[in-house]
Amino acid sequence: MENPFVIKSYKSKELFCDREKELETLIRNFGNDTDTTIVSLRRMGKTGLIYRLFDEIKIKSLDILPVYVDIYASRTIADFIKLTAEAVLRAFPQESSIGKHFMKFIKSLRPQFSFDTLTGEVQLQIGYQGIAEKEHTLKELFEFLDQQNINILLVYDEFQQIREYPEQNIEALLRTYMQTLKNVHFIFCGSKKHLMTDIFA
């Protein structure tokens, strides 16, 4: 007998209860070029809401390319770049024009490619000469996304993790790069209210 209880964060629109007002707010914020911050304890449905949003974007054929980036396991700005690039690779169909352009961009960084033995997903390893090169790569990555002829929604989960990075200027750096983007919009999710409040205060 099939288990009737859903134990994963999100399966389908039909099995997702409530949060309709929150869903409408997220879509409206995107339409108004407004970035959004979502804060709640872990295991309270943030990720499920995000995947429900992605589903709604697909159902309504909205002109939005959503990208989900979980940075909970990240420890440095290099991890942040790696996880963002891998998430974009998963989101862009490789046979599409934008997918081909992004792969060309990634190859220009001279990464090492590997595949996750469990999921089969592409993994990247990018070498850097120093912090300046990391900052430049992050800037190039955001600029590449902004130059595409499509609206991109970047969702960063567990965003407060950037506070654990050894690089002291990461918040100012991200703010500087992100605030100039016109076609890339953001949702920042976090589970530690005091850190998220401090970041966005």
Image (cartoon, rainbow, N blue to C red):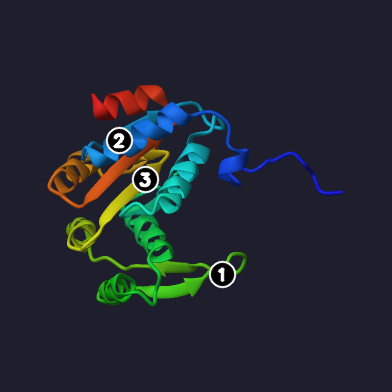
Give residue 189's position: percent from left, percent from top: 39, 36
Residue 127 in the image, given as x and y percentages of width and height: 31, 68
Q: Earlier in the sequence, mark 1 or mark 3?
A: 1
Q: Quadrant of residue 107?
A: bottom left
Q: Residue under circle 3?
A: 155
The alpha-carbon separation of the residues under discs 1 and 3 comes to 22 Å
Residue at horizontal 44%, vertical 48%?
54
**Residue furthest front as drawn:** 60
Q: Is residue 70 left or right of residue 6?
A: left
What residue is rendered at 39% in x and 77% in y?
95
Residue depicted at 43% across the width and 75% down the height: 113
Q: Earlier in the sequence, mark 2 or mark 1?
A: 2
**Chain-order first, disc 2 or disc 3:** 2
Q: Nearer the viewer, mark 2 or mark 3?
A: 2
Give the spatial CA distance, label 2 vs label 3.
Answer: 16 Å
Task: Residue at 33% x, 43% y: name it.
Answer: 165
**Number of other residues with Cα within 10 Å of mark 1, as a class: few under 14, some 14 to 19, many 20 or more:** few
Q: Nearer the viewer, mark 1 or mark 3?
A: 3
- Pointer 1 and pointer 3: residues touching (CB < 8 Å)? no
Give the SS element for disc 2.
helix
**In terms of image quadrants, where is residue 63?**
bottom left
Which amino acid type is shown beneath numbered disc 3?
Val
Q: Which residue is mark 1?
A: 120
The residue that label 2 is drawn on is 28
